[in-house]
Amino acid sequence: MASEAGEADQDESVDEEESTVASNGKPETENGADGEASEEEEEDEEPRLKYASFTKHLRPVYRNGDATSAFLVAGDKMIIGTHSGNIHVLSVPSLRPIRVYHAHTASVSGLSIAPFPPPLAATKLDAVNRVASEHRGSPRPSTPKSHNEKPSPRTPQQQPVPLTPSNMIYIASSSIDGNVCVASLTDPKDVQLRNFGRPLQTVSLSPDYRSDRSYLSGGMAGNLVLTVGGRIGATSTSTTTGSAAASASSWLGAIGLGANTGRDQVLHSGEGAVSTIKWSLSGKHIVWVNEQGIKIMRSNLHLETGESEFAWKRISHTDHPNRPGWDEMAGIWKAHVEWIDEAGLESDERYSTANGSVEKLRDPPDLERLKAPQKSRRTEKLVVGWSGTIWIINVHPGGPGVGKEVGERKIGRAEVVTMYDVTG
C-alpha cells in the first residue's frame, strides 16, 4: 500500500510539472491544444509600425517651452497650433518653415484649411519616407549662435510666401480664448479675428471660403454657428455673444449703416459642447459632434434647382457611445471625424512569390469595404472614432425620385454601414 501511495504521489508530481510546462507556453507535443493556441496568438500579433520622431527637428515650434495643442496635415502642408497661440506652417516632406504667426492669446483648439488640397502624389510619399529615415538616424541640427545672442519671443522677420497654387489657401484656427482667426497664407493683410465670447473647440472653413467667406465654429456655448462675411484686417464681435457692441453692430448692419463686420447664425444648440465640425470633401455635407451624438446636415453649396429649402437641414443623428460614466466624461472624450477620399486610398498591388507562384495580395477587409463601389459615385463616406467606438457612415445624396412619392425630392440620408467596439 505504501508503494502504491508513493507511485501515486510521483504521478501527481509529474502531472503538476506537465501543467507548469504547458502554462509556460512549452507544450510537450507539437499537436497539443496548447501548441495550437500558441500558434493562434502568434498569428494575431499586431504588425510593428515604422515611425520617426520629428520633435527634435522642429526647434522653432517648441521654443521657450511651447507645446502642440492642435495639429493638421493636408496635402503638402503641416500646420501646428500651440498652447501659446502660435500657428506654424511647414512644407511636407521637407519640414521647411513657410510661415509663423501669432493668432491667439491662449491654446489653439482647432485648425481648418480651404480649399481642400489634393493628396500627395506617390513620388512625394516616397520622399516623406526618405526624410523620415534620414531624420531617424541623423543628429540634432544645430544653429550657429553669437555669444551675445539671446532668444527673442517675437516672431522673426519672414520672407514672403511664394504665390504658388498649393500656397493659395486660407487657414482658420479656433482657441479657448473665444476667437476664430482666419488668415491667408500668402497675404498677411488678409486676416480676420472674431470673438465668440466663450471657449471654442473647433472651426471648419467652407471649401469655397475664397468666394463666400463663410465658416462654422462651435465650443463650450453649445452653439453650431455659421459666420458669413467680415471686414479684412479687423477684429469683430460675434452677434451671438449678446453684448451691447454685438447688438449695435447687428442693428446698424441690418439698416445698412454699419460696416461689413459679418453676420452669425446659430444653426443648432442646446445639446452640450460642440467638439468637432468638418465640411465634406464635396462641400455638400457637414458633420458635427456634440455631447449627444453625431449630426450630419446638408450645406448650402451645390444645390440644384428646387433644393434651396434643403440648405442647413439636418439629415441624420447617431447617438453617442453607450459607455459607463458618460455623464462625467462627455466633455473629455472627443470625437475624431474624417471624410474619406476614395480616389486617394492606396491600392495594394503588391505580389508575393512562394514556391514559384505569384499571388496578388488583397487589401484588408476594412479597406476593401471603404473602396467598394457605391450605387452612386456621389455617395460620400465618413469615418468617426469616439471613445472606443468606430463608425463607417455612407452619406447618400438627395434629389428627384428618391422620396416615397413619385417625383418627390428628398434631402438625402446617412447610413451606418459598420460599427466597431474596439474596447473589447
Image (cartoon, rainbow, N blue to C red):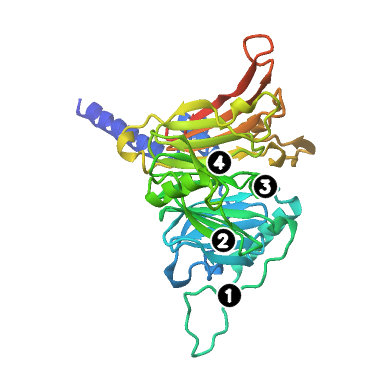
Report which quarter residue 134 is drawn in.
Answer: bottom right
* Residue type, numbered disc 3: Ser
Q: Which of marks 4 and 3 is in front?
A: 3
Q: What residue does disc 4 label?
A: 278
- Res 198 seen here: no
CA separation in Å, label 1 and label 4: 37 Å
Mark closer to the chain start, 1 or 3: 1
Give the structural element (helix, strand or loop) at label 2.
loop
Mark closer to the chain start, 4 or 2: 2
Give the structural element (helix, strand or loop) at label 4.
strand
- In the picture, the disc for residue 233 is 2
Mark closer to the chain start, 1 or 4: 1
Q: Residue furthest top?
A: 405
CA separation in Å, label 3 and label 2: 17 Å
CA separation in Å, label 1 and label 3: 42 Å
* Residue type, numbered disc 4: Lys
Q: Position of residue 152 (x, y in %)?
A: 48, 78
Q: Quadrant where the N terminus lies? A: top left
- Res 178 seen here: yes
* 112 to the left or right of 291: right
- Seen in the picture, residue 2 relative to 100 is either above or below; the reply is above
CA separation in Å, label 1 and label 2: 37 Å
Q: Position of residue 330 (x, y in %)?
A: 36, 38
> Which residue occupies 53% across, 70% down?
60
Q: What residue does disc 1 label?
A: 141
